[in-house]
Image (cartoon, rainbow, N blue to C red):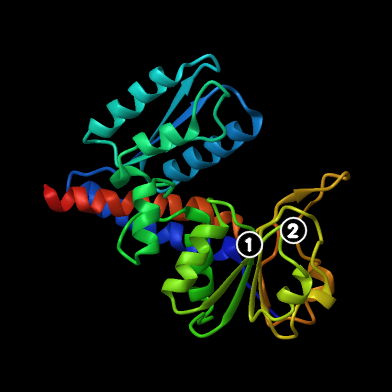
Amino acid sequence: MELLDGRALANELTQAQQMTVATLKQQGVTPKLVVVMVGDDPASAIYTQSKQRRATKIGMASELKRLSAETTEADLLAVVRQLNTDETVDGILVQLPLPKQINEDHIIRAIDPQKDVDGFSPVNIGRLWLNQPGLVACTPNGIMRLLAAHDIDVAGKNVVIVGRSNIVGRPLAALMLNANATVTIAHSRTADLKALTKTADILVAAIGKPHFFGIEDVKEGAVVVDVGINRLEDGTVTGDVDFEALKSHVSAMTPVPRGVGPMTITMLMDQTIEIAKERAKRG
């Protein structure tokens, strides 16, 4: 079995990003990412800190705007509009979830699609499904880069994605379709789910249930991408598939952790840098 090691690839890409950022700085452009965090959700705090550390590591400018949990939707929209018009800001990310008084959809729609490094804007989602250039959700983008790095061609393959979220399942389906795969999106209402997963040349598990898929649910020689991050009672982090059972059964598989996760932040930085490149071209 080939191990699809996201951490190793992320490290390689980070080195390349460092060189690109250094070149952009010589041209007078420093890529800048601004993360807006409303409230003090512990998980969100960890994610935002990880993003800032990575940005600093590659030489980017990074700013965290912390707003109180009592922030109104109008106040947050005002912050977003200010960032939209700030020419030094390349990427804007509003950390989800938001407090209940704020409509997430309103905020996502307010972000300039050209600075929407999360790839959640309806404009960017539309571009993705039309197979047009645009910013793409980071986790699906990372999955495609990881497969490509291991010379796994998805064209003509039967891809089954278990999970239909706007963050992973739906945008990944579009990326796979654009790459000429035959795609099925499965979910909680899918009849005879595991009979379907057994047909997949490439199985993507993104349902958040530890060890849900075992050897009897996966075709021999399949490629398995495990997006699940589940914390067990003993503190262990594991995925949606039974890694130990499947490792002698499949041709390639991502580990959890060190698989898909490291690629997500790497793609966030990558997209911010690409926006900064366009800024440099404009002078």
Q: Going by the picture, which residue comes out furthest to the top?
A: 70
Q: Which amino acid does the dot numbered 2 rest on?
A: Gly
Residue at image position (60%, 56%) is: 164
Asked whether the beta carbons under mark 2 and mark 1 sit within 8 Å of each other, the answer is yes
Residue 19 location (% of width, % of height): 33, 57
Sooner in the amino-acid sequence: mark 2 or mark 1: 2
Residue 95 location (% of width, % of height): 50, 35
Which class describes the residues within 10 Å of circle 1: few (<14), some (14-19), or many (20+)? many
Is residue 39 in view from this perspective? yes
Tag 2's secondary structure?
loop
Q: Quadrant of residue 234?
A: top right
Which class describes the residues within 10 Å of circle 2: few (<14), some (14-19), or many (20+)? many
Residue 31 lies left or right of residue 199; in this view the side is left
Is residue 145 in view from this perspective? no
In this view, 131 is above or below 268 = below
Residue 24 location (% of width, % of height): 24, 51
Residue nearest the observer in this picture, 76 or 27: 76
In the picture of the structure, the residue carrying the numbered disc 2 is 239
Residue at image position (83%, 70%) is: 214
Q: Quadrant of residue 2?
A: bottom right
Residue 239 location (% of width, % of height): 74, 58
Cα distance in 3D space between marks 2 and 1: 10 Å
User: How many numbered markers are drawn?
Assistant: 2
Q: Going by the picture, which residue comes out furthest to the right?
A: 234
Tag 1's secondary structure?
loop
Q: Going by the picture, which residue comes out furthest to the left?
A: 283
Residue mark closest to the camera, 2 vs 1: 2
Residue 6 lies left or right of residue 266; in this view the side is right
Q: Which amino acid does the dot numbered 1 rest on?
A: Gly
Residue nearest the observer in this picture, 262 or 187: 187
Residue at image position (51%, 63%) is: 172
In the picture of the structure, the residue carrying the numbered disc 1 is 259
